[in-house]
Amino acid sequence: SSDWNSTVTHKAAEAAALAQKKSAEAIARARMAEERLSAERKSTAFWRRQAQAAEEEAGSLKTRSAAAEVKQAVMVEELASERRKAARMFDSLKYEFMNAEKVQSEELHSANERKRQLEAELEQVKKELRNKNLENQRIIEAEQERIEREKSRASNRMRPSFSRKKRQGSNVSMSGSVIHHEETRTADQSMKEMSIKLQNDVMSLRKEHDLVRHTSIDEINSLQNLSKEWSRQAGRAVEASRAEAEYLREKLAAESAMRLKLLNELQDIRGTVRVYCRPKPCSGGEPTITIPTHDILVLNKDTAALSFKFDRVFSPSSSQHEIFSELEEPLISSLDGFNVTLLAFGQQRSGKTYSVLGDCGFDSRGQAILQCYGVQLQTLQQLFTIASHRTDRYKDTFSITIVEVHNEKLIDLVAGTPLADSDGHVVICETRRDKKDRKSVVIAESSWHKGKLEIKTNIDGNTVVQGLVTVPINSFEDACTLWQQSITKQLERLRRQGSDLKKYDKNSNIIATIHITSINVATGVGTEGKLQFVDMAASDVAPVPKKENFDINKSPDADDTHFSNKSIDAFNDVVNARCQFDRSVPYRNSTLTHLLRDSLEADAKVLLLCCVSTDQADLTDAIGTLRFASRIQKVSIGKATKHIVGSKE
C-alpha cells in the first residue's frame, strides 16, 4: 500500500506539474496574444494616422494645385497684358517711326526737287551766259572788222587830193565816221556793263546754289542721324519687350511644370483615369470643336453646344513632342516599378495610330518605315536614354509582346519575325494548380509551337496570354526594328488573305506590352514595371434606329451610346458598370476587356488619349467618343503601388 501511495503521489505530482506547465504555456500564449493584439492596435493606429496624413496631404495637394492653377491664370493674364502692352508700344513706335520716315522721305524729296530746280536754273544761266559770251564775241569780232575798215579808210584819207569836190566828200565821210565811232563806243560800254552784270548774277547764283547744296547735305545728314537714333530707340524698346515676354514665358513654363507635377501627384492619390483629348485638324469647312482653355473643349452644332472638361485638351496643331511632353511623367514612372497603361480611343481616321506609334509608310520593297515617332516610341527612346545614364547603379532589362485582337481572336504580331525567331521565347503562365503539378507546365511548354493563344491568370493574379512570344530589346533601334518587322508581317498576311486593309484596321485592337525590370547593382533589390499601349478599334457610333433620334443636347454622362465594334461596345459596358459601382463587371464579355482587366481593376496608372475629328461629317461619332471619355474619368482604379522584387540572379 505504501508503494501504491507513493505511485499515486508521484503521478499526482506529475499531473500537477503538467497542469502547471500547460497553465504557464496558456499564460504565455495569452501574453503573446495580448502583445500581438497590442501590436495590431498600434499598427492600426499607425496606419490610421498614415491614412489621415495621406488625406491631409491630398487636401494640401488639392489646395496647392488650385493655388497653382490660380497663379497660372494670373500669370497667363499678366503675360497677355504684357503682350498687349508690348504690342501697343511696338505699334506706337512703329507708327512714329513710319511718320518720321515719311517726313524724312518728304524732306529728302523736297530737297532733291529744290536741288534739281537749282541745277536747272544754273544750267539755264550757264546757257544764257554762253549765249551772251558768243554774242559778245561776235560783237568784238564785228568791232575789230570795223576798226580795220576805219584804219583802211584813214589811210586812204591821208592821200593828196587836188579837187575841192573830193575834199568836201572826204570831210563829210570823216564827220560820219566820227559819229559812227561814238555810237560804237557807247554800244561797247553798254555790252561791257551787261557782261559784268551777267557775271555778277552768275556769281550770285553759284553762291546761292552752293548754299542750297550745303544746306541740303546738312539736312540729309541730320535726317539720317535722326533716323538712326529713332531706329535705335525702337530696337531698344522691342528688345526690352521681348526680354520681358521671354521672362514671363519662362515663368509661365515653370508654373505650368509645377501645375503638371501637382496634378500628377493628385491623380496618383485619387487613382482615377487621366483623360487627354487631341482633336484632329479640320480637313475642310468650319471645325466643330473650339478650345477656350487648356482643359475645356466645346463641341458646336448649329445653335447647340456641348462642353467637356478633361485633364488636358491639346490644340489641333500640337506636335508629337508636345503630346509626349504632357504624358511623359506617368509613362516614365514604369521604370520605377509602376504599371502604366495608355489607351488610344477614337473614331476612324482620327489619328490614334499616328499619336501612339507614328507615321507608318512602306518602301518600294513593301517594308514598313516608321517616321514622326508617336508617344510609344518616344517613351521607349526616353527609357533607354535614362537606362544608359544609370548603368553604374541599375541593371535595366526590357522585353516586349505585341498582340492583336480582331473579331475576338488573338493574333501574335511578333511571332514569325526575324527578331522573334532569333531571340524570342514563349510566355508560359504558371497557375497554382501548375505549381502543384509540374507535368502541366511541361505539356504547356511543348504545345506552344502550335500557335495556340490562351488568356490565363497566373499565380500572382495577373492576366497573361499564354503562348505569346516575348522578345528582349536592348536598344531603341531594336524596338523600331521589331515594330517594322511586325507591321510588314501583318501586311503580308492580310494580302494573302485578300482582306480589306481599311476595314480590317477599323476593327483591330493592338496591345503592346513592355515589361521593365530594374535591379539595384549594390543591393540586389529591384522593381518590375509594366508599360502598356493600346491602339483601340474605331469608336464609330452604331446607326441609330429610325424610331430614335440622336440628341446632341443630352448630358455628356449619358450611357446609352452603342458602338459599331463589339470590343469597343463591351469596353463601354465595363466602364458603365465601373461608374455605377456594380458588383458584377462584365470583363469576360470580350477578349479586349478580359485582357485589360488588370489595367482597369488593379493598381495601375491609366491614361486615355481621346482622338476626335473636327469635321462636320464626323460630328455624331465625335459626340459618342467625347461622352465616353467624359464617363471614364469617373472610374476609380486606386492608387498605383510600386512593385518591388528581390534579386533574380
Image: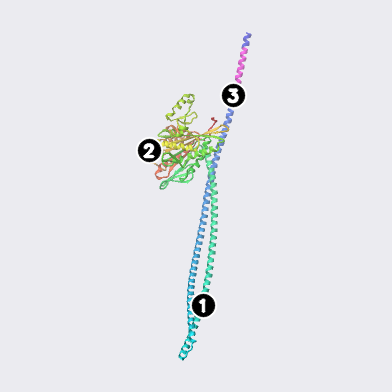
Residue 270: which disc? none
Residue 513 seen in the figure: yes
Q: Which residues are magenta?
A: 8-28
| Residue 633 position in % (x across, y down) | 47, 39
Residue 27 included in the magenta stretch of the image: yes
Tag 1 residue:
192
Q: Is residue 170 left or right of residue 30?
A: left
Q: Is residue 183 above or below residue 622?
A: below
- Dot 3 or dot 1, earlier in sequence: 3
| Residue 87 position in % (x across, y down) | 51, 53
Tag 3 residue:
30
Q: Residue at x 59, y 23 (%)?
A: 29
Q: Please tell me which residue lies in front, 72 or 359.
A: 359
Which quadrant of the figure contains the N terminus?
Answer: top right
Label 1 amino acid?
Answer: Lys
Residue 624 seen in the figure: no
- Report if the CB atoms under discs 1 and 2 are less than 8 Å apart: no
- Dot 1 or dot 2, earlier in sequence: 1
Label 2 amino acid?
Answer: Asp
Residue 500: which disc? 2
Q: Secondary structure at mark 2?
A: loop
How far apart are the alpha carbons under marks 3 and 1?
151 Å
Label 3 amino acid?
Answer: Ala
Q: Please tell me which residue lies in front, 627 or 252.
A: 252
